Each structure stands twice: as structure tokens, then as C-alpha cells.
Amino acid sequence: MTENDEASSLPTVADRSPPAAIAVDHLVKVYKQTRAVDDISFSLPRGSITGLLGGNGAGKTTTIAMIMGLVLPTSGRVQVLGHRMPEDSASVLGRMNFESPYVDMPMRLTVRQNLTVFGKLYAVKNLSDRIAELAEDLDLTDFIDRANGKLSAGQKTRVALAKALINQPELLLLDEPTASLDPDTADWVRAHLERYRRDNDATILLASHNMLEVERLCDRVIIMKRGRIEDDDTPEAIMARYNRTTLEEVFLDVARGRVNGAKEAAR
Amino acid sequence: MTDTSLHRGISVHRIGAMILRYWYLLLSSWPRLLELLYWPALQVITWGFLQLYIAENASFFARAGGTLIGAVILWDILFRGQLGFSISFLEEMWARNLGNLMMSPLKPIEFLLSLMAMSLIRLAIGVIPMTLLALFLFHFNVYALGLPLIAFFCNLIFTSWSVGIFVSGLVLRNGLGAESIVWTLMFAILPLACVYYPVSVLPAWLQYVAWALPPTYAFEGMRALLIEHTFRTDLMLEALAINVVLLGASFWAFLALLRSAREHGSLLAGGE
């Protein structure tokens, strides 16, 4: 059974096993004449880290936005933690969170004020303890009472990550989590995400252009191109299939339309 | 904030969290606080002196003391009420924070309720000093209107929220390119709501339009109170009925525009 077949049979009430963290079934999004997402299906088991790869305009952000309920699909279905999105979003939004370069935290509020507001929105219990814990984990203590707008890019990313983790989400959606970070900070963020997944058995879906990041973090990779899924497997299996040693080379093969040649060469 | 239900499981804590967010913002920025005080004070001083001048030179205005300055204060309740609502909404657009809120458990109705609360808080900061200025400079005590003032206030603030909700929906759907509507739409009501003159001044056909606007009833009611010393309960009840319809329609429009924004991907764009 392929991933697509698996996803098209979404969990029913009668199923005993816990529902997939994310189940996407024949998802389509059309903007006027453009098919931004073109009939994709996949299912992510709980506790997995999956990388969503693809060039600009491949449909990654639109896919994530549909999973979050920010964009309505033209057709198809999305289930998150066993609940239909966006119809049943009230049941899941408190159990998930996200970070994206397309949104900011209010600049004039201090880090502590921002985390307080979002903690209250997510009904976090013992909020001041949770903020102290995150400040310790993510090394925010030195600037926790500084306005968000006065932080460096790396500090802002750590604050955004703290907001994304404030409710200890079961599902974390990350769009370019290390974009514009220096290698040291980016490595530090990746290590934290790995630790968070391990300690909380959380599911993470991340869209990234950083192939090294995906190789390091992800146990599964979905490659998108022009709104469709081009490939879907473990990083190792994909690299083997394309006869490449890095995901970056695979990415270039896909982006430049050398897919068939690379696959044939591998055979 | 993807749940489109208006009332299911409303959380006072989430509304409180949003009020706290705007309160932090106000306290962090003295220009924002100053702006709340500046325009209402300027308005009341300008119109107050004009009223003094006219009263000294026209017997009608001498008799109808306070109608102009009263109109200025009530107009500011209407206008600042809408701005207080809309600016808090725009703060989220300017801060690119809307995505964070949309992805949180905050419901649309909770978001709107928090914006209503903020419009009251901002209004209090701006208009209470304005009324005190009117009292000390021009001996016009708006609080002497007594209970009718509450009726005028409620009807005006309900209209301001209806307009605020509707224009926020437009900005949500169309991005910050629609921001100018926030600042200008209320001025389209100004001549029709007969803020400074009675409805009878308008041509007959335009009077039908004027009476479709709840603020018209508040301004007519205020003039009846100050000139004829009569509180027109009928006007207030009619205004309340229209306001209920307007508020319902604006909620519906906001949800429809939110849905349209999600269909067109506008929530991701957010900008112009």
C-alpha cells in the first residue's frame, strides 16, 4: 500500500490505534488559474519528524497553511490529531503550535509579556513556571524583559520557538525554522528541536530549504514540486533512489527536472 | 481562530489575555497614549470657543446652550469608539501577529470582544479628560445629562463597534491596502447622522437615510434634551433596535470576510 492509499483511508471512529498526527487526503488548492497544491495525500505518524522540501512556489507553505486551517482547501480533507480541520479546529489548536518567518511577535512587548499573553491564550497552567523553564531551556534569561523589537535575529528566533513551545504542543509545524540564522544558532535550534521531540514524543512537520537540516532532523522527507508530491520516503531511501549522497543533490535533480535520469541511473 | 462559531465555549481568560496584550502595548508607547488625548482635547477646545462666540451673537444658540459642544463630545464617542476598536485590530496587522492569533485557540468572537473592551478603555482615556476640559473651560457638564447620557453612549458605542467590526473584516480580507477605510468610513456618516444640525435641515428624501442610522437618534435625542428638556425614550429604543440589526450584520460580515480571506490565502499575505 502506498502512502497515498494509506492517507485516503482516514481513521474512523472504529479504529483502535491512535489517529495519525496529520492525515492529508487528496488535498487541492487552486488560486484563480494556479493549482498551488495539486491532489496530495500523506499521513504522518505520531512522534515523527518530517521534512517538507521543494523550491519556491512548490506548495509547501500553502500545504502547511491548510493543515493549520489558515487557508481553506479547494477540495480534499485534512485531519489533525484525529480532528477535521478547520471544522473541528477548536479541539486541536490548543494542542499544536507553529513558527513561521511570515509572522512576528509584537515588537513593543517584552519577551516576558509576549510569552505571558500567548501562555494565557493557550491556557497554560503555572504560566510563570513555564516561562521560567523556557527561558532556561532556550537561554532567554538575559533579555527576557527586553522589547522583542530590540533583539537580534537569533534571539528573536529563540523567542518565536519559545512561543511555539509554550503549550508543550503534541504537533509542531515549522516553516523555515532556521532561516537567516548563523550556523551556530541554527545548530543550537536543531538540537533543541531534536531534544523536544525525544522528550515529548511530539510530531514535527518542517518546511525547509536547508538540506543538511532535513538530513539531520527528519526521519521522513516529502519532496514537492509544482504543487504535487514528487517523492516521499526516508532521506536514506530517497538518496539511494536518486543515486546521490546528499539531499541537496536530490533537490537539484528534482528542481532541474533530472528526476527520471537520476532514478534510471540508480537502477 | 479558525473556528467560525460565534459563541461556543467563549473563554474570558482568552479575552483577558488579548486585553492584556493591548494594555502592555499602550503602556509601552507614550505617543500612543498622547494621541488618545490630543485630538479629543483639540476638538472640544475649538468647538467650545465657537459655541461661546455663537451664543453671544445668536439668541437661539444662547437658549440652546451646549448643543454644539455636546454634539462634539457625542461625535467623539462614536468616532473614537470605532477608532479604538479598529486601531487595536490594525496593531495586529502592523505587527504581523495575526497569524499567531489565528493559529491559537482564540475564537473570532473572543477576538472581537477583546477589541470592544479595548475601544472602551481607549475611549475612557481620551474622552473623560475631554469632558473635564468642557466642564472647566466652557462650564458644560455632560454628566449633568444624567441617565439619558447612558442611552446616548450605548447607542453610539454599538454603532461604532458595528462599523469597527465591518472595516476590520475588510482589512482582514483585503490586507493593509484597505487601511484607509478604517480612518475615513465614519466621516461618511457625519453629514447624514446630523451631528451638528437637526434632521429637518436635510431634504425629505435624505431624511429617510438619516433615520436609518442609529447615531441620528442619539444626536436628535441630545438636542431634544438640551433645548426642550425632554428625554425621547422612543428615539433611544428605535436606535437600539437598528443597532441590534447592525451588530448582527457586522458579525455576519466579519465571519464571511474571514472565510473569504481563508479561501483566498489573504491571511498568509497580510500586507498590502
Image (spheres, rainbow, N blue to C red):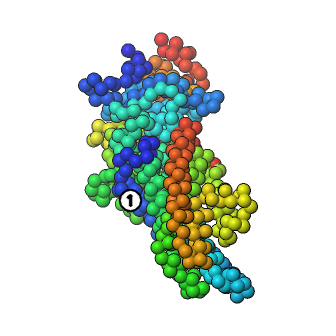
Chain ID at mark 1: B
Horizontal placement of B232 versus B206: left or right? left
As helix, strand or loop, the secondary structure at mark 1 comes to helix
Check the image and report above or below for B216 versus B99: below
Q: Quadrant of the N terminus of chain A?
A: top left
Q: How many numbered discs, if any? A: 1
The front one of A64 and A135 is A64
Check the image and report above or below for A5 versus B238: above
Q: Residue at x 33, y 52 (%)?
A: A123
Horizontal placement of B52 versus A195: left or right? right
Q: Position of residue B26 (x, y in %)?
A: 49, 67
For label 1, the crowd category at 10 Å Cα-Cα, with few meaning under 14, some 14 to 19 and many 20 or more, is some
The front one of B223 and B8 is B223
The front one of A81 and B190 is B190
Q: Residue at x 63, y 31 (%)?
A: A32
Horizontal placement of A118 versus B266: left or right? left
Q: Position of residue B245 (x, y in %)?
A: 53, 51
Q: Residue at x 54, y 69 (%)?
A: B232
On the question of residue A117 being in view, the answer is no
Q: Position of residue B42 (x, y in %)?
A: 63, 77
On the question of residue A241 being in view, the answer is yes
Horizontal placement of B53 versus A30: left or right? right
Q: Residue at x 35, y 45 (%)?
A: A94
Give the labeled residue for mark 1.
B16
Q: Specify the amino acid type for callout 1.
A: Gly
The front one of A129 and A24 is A24
Q: Position of residue A147 (x, y in %)?
A: 46, 63
Q: In the current view of this chain or complex, which residue is farthest to the left?
A: A16
